[in-house]
Image (spheres, grey):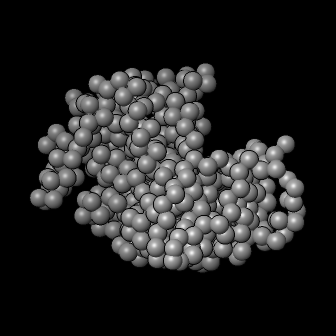
Amino acid sequence: MSNKLLVKNAKQVVLICNNGEKFLTKDGMQKLCVIENSSLVIGSDGLIKDIGPASTIDFQYAGVLFDKVIDATGMCVIPVVLFDYCVSGLVDAHTHPVWAGDRVHEFAMKLAGATYMDVHRAGGGIHFTVEHTRAALPSTLLASLTGRLGRMQRAGTTLVECKSGYGLELQTELKMLEVIETARRTLPINISSTYCGAHAVPKGKTVAEATTDILKVQLPQLRERMSAGALRVDNIDVFCEQGVFDLSSTRSILQAGLDMGLNINFHGDELHPMNSAQLGAELGALAISHLEEVTDDGIAAMATAKTAAILLPTTAYILRLPQPRARDMLEAGVIVALGSDFNPNAYCCSMPVVMHLACVNMRMSMPEALAAATINAAYALGRSHTHGSLEVNKHGDLLVLNAPRWEHLIYQLGGHQELIRYVVIRGNVVYNNDKTMDF
């Protein structure tokens, strides 16, 4: 039986980690595992079989058949030879990619000074998207989702978290989750599915009524679909915020999801310090997103509980919010991950752009940003045993870069279109970009 892929003679292979670590913190994020002049083998099952010096791999696999060979030494442009770097596929730990309705008009409102909640109260924001998503056909939602995931994939994302949350009632939430399920089964990109029925309080309902509907109507139906094998859902999310779901309702919903076997991965401490971080740590949350207003006690609680912080620099940038306290979290030993927060309010499909913003605005180093967008983001989705680093028996998800150093993926703002030569998922080349760039 032939192997799927041989990537040979790479100038560097950025493993991220190589001792089975499920996440990296503090100093570990500064010292990523990199091996020089190496080759990598992916087997017919899509898992990494071997990584090592190019000469050793050449000798061990002499005469072995491969479905495809990527020879790093064979790629160049005039007048400069570009050395190829092999990097683990990127992981986007927080997205809202299933929706209908265009909210470009809200960008003008925000530029004129409107806050997130100003837009929300004016009938825009989530409720605008909910109205259009409820009316959209599943086929329409799937077509737009497929296009968005394709853009993410071309920007180097190989594992992405996808939320529902623009239904706020049973049928539309299930419709969104079914669209995500169809994408998971038919597209090459890896998907972690999240039920986010508590994304906002539906019009005409109180928080108590919305909470009861989720607990008594939506979650039981979701459990039934999951038990029947019709849906695979991995995580439960709640928007814990003033004017949305308070701490008590958030606790009830998250606990119910946990009892169903879902990972807790929710929005917290974004606009106001809600003590969401402490709640998440208490419940054993896998991850909490946003955290622009997290307190010192919340940071300490997350570090102790090994609850990941999914930081979203695009949100703070677009909404002109305070930047998440990445440096404080890193120093405290919190597991810091990154996500794009792709949604109609923060339209960014590119994890390289997210990493760049994390470095410039949140003062992360480039190795920290790469670790946060690979192994730690995979940890935040409960997938770091299979994704997030280039290690034997993990999924063969990787990027091959046309660049003199891997750091160019972060350094060149918006330059990933030229830098990413190949995107590989489970050993299959899902994107072959023949553009090269003259340095």
Tell me the quadrant of the picture where the N terminus can be found. top right
Q: Is residue 167 left or right of residue 69?
A: left
Identify which residue is drawn at 70% across, 60% down: 7
Identify which residue is drawn at 75% across, 44% down: 45
Q: Residue furthest left?
A: 112
Q: List x then y, in percent, for residue 96.
A: 39, 44
Q: Nearer the viewer, residue 231 or 300?
A: 231
Q: Nearer the viewer, residue 268 or 139?
A: 139
Q: List x then y, in percent, for residue 16.
A: 64, 67
Q: Quadrant of residue 22?
A: bottom right
Q: Is residue 107 left or right of residue 20?
A: left
Identify which residue is drawn at 82% across, 65% down: 57
Q: List x then y, in percent, for residue 405.
A: 55, 76
Identify which residue is drawn at 32% across, 26% down: 136
Q: List x then y, in percent, for residue 300.
A: 50, 68
Q: How many numbered marks appear?
A: 0
